[in-house]
Image: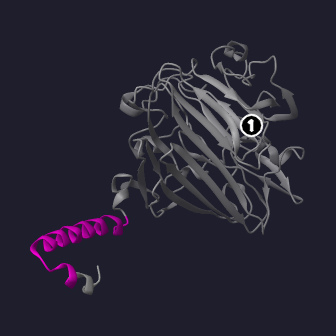
Amino acid sequence: MRTSSLKTVFGSRTTVSFTLAVMLLLITSCATTDQPTGKSMTRLQEQNWGTVDGKVVKLFTLTNRKGTIVKITNYGLIITDIQTADRDGKLGHIVLGFDNLDQYLKGHPFFGAIAGRVANRIAKGKFTLEGKEYTLAVNNGPNHLHGGKKGFDKQVWEARPLPSREDAQAIEFHYVSKDGEEGYPGNLDITVTYTLTDSDDLRMDYRATTDKSTPVNVTNHSYFNLAGVGDTLGTEMQINADRYTVTDKTLIPTGELAPVKGTALDFTRPATMGARIDQLKDFPGGYDHNFVLNSSGGKLAFAARAHEPKSGRVLEVLTTEPGVQLYNGIGLDGKLLGHGGTPYVKFGGFCLETQHFPDAINHPSFPSVVLRPGETFQSTTVFRFVAK
């Protein structure tokens, strides 16, 4: 209120009381909105989680108005925990992860982490770009996997919570991958933004530039279990893909794009992941396949939907990427204990890794993963949570 207005309304005891009440309300309101963490104090929390290589590791907790909880650490951009409601409104853990940093440092199968500089496999850890051959670490049989021995998943990223919005909370992470890191050329400057909205979307926006031509293919490697415990073979899966990339015995694409129709990979209509998994028991033992999305990439479009009948939880995945890798925890064996001591058993989690195709750098017919100076790499993936 202006001073002249105050003089006018101060004419009686009643108006004085009313005015004081209004002023108190305004002061209280300003105290809430002026603080950067005011409304977001319970919606975006930050805590020290330890140190790696002398750098402080933070754990961020995002909470939306529906009560959904997402926890992310700047170590490897790991999504350590997602809690969503089932059809009865009961919150439960739906991704595989640990409650402390030490367990991640002991080693894990990329639970919730960012994979890069190049996610998935590169044959024999070699590629040629602009006439020069590059050699990378071989860390998955005869091949290079998910960026190497110390990829993006093992780096401490700079983190900056973004200004709170009415309907969303977001954190921006930044990292500069130096020229020659893990054998890759060029200084890659990459920013990843995680946003949790009140409509239960977890959005991941990736943006990168380079000063030398280099391959780039990043993804999030969260393992989902929409029931919370046990295996996921009863989860119904639908993938918007009529074709997949055929691979050799080391999971390197041959170059052939084959139809999924009539195979165990046909998820064009919803089917449980356990329905045809026996067809894959000899190789690769379960699902570890790249699907060629019908949307072809470039625009945000529906990629996959998973529905867990018992809990009623649904995960929808939208992406600008041309492919998605379905991996259903073939390598889990129950020895790793996660949230609340939950054993992570074989097939106990599934990944939907939105991506360019595996070994694309060695397949000119595949969508290119090469980023050149002056260009900007951009990619978006959305995990949408529903209960029915």
Residue 289 place in picture, x, y as percent = 73, 30
Camera sees residue 135: yes
Residue closer to the observer: 159 or 387: 387
Residue closer to the observer: 65 or 247: 65
Residue closer to the observer: 298 or 251: 298
The magenta region covers 7-36
* Main SS, magenta residues: helix
- Left or right of residue 197: residue 243: right
Q: Is residue 51 placed above or below 1 in the rendered structure?
A: above
Q: Is residue 181 magenta?
A: no
Query: What's the colour scheme?
Result: one colour
Residue closer to the observer: 29 or 3: 3
Per the image, label 1 sits on a secondary structure element best described as loop
For the N terminus, the image quarter is bottom left
Camera sees residue 139: no
Residue located beneath label 1 in the image: 142
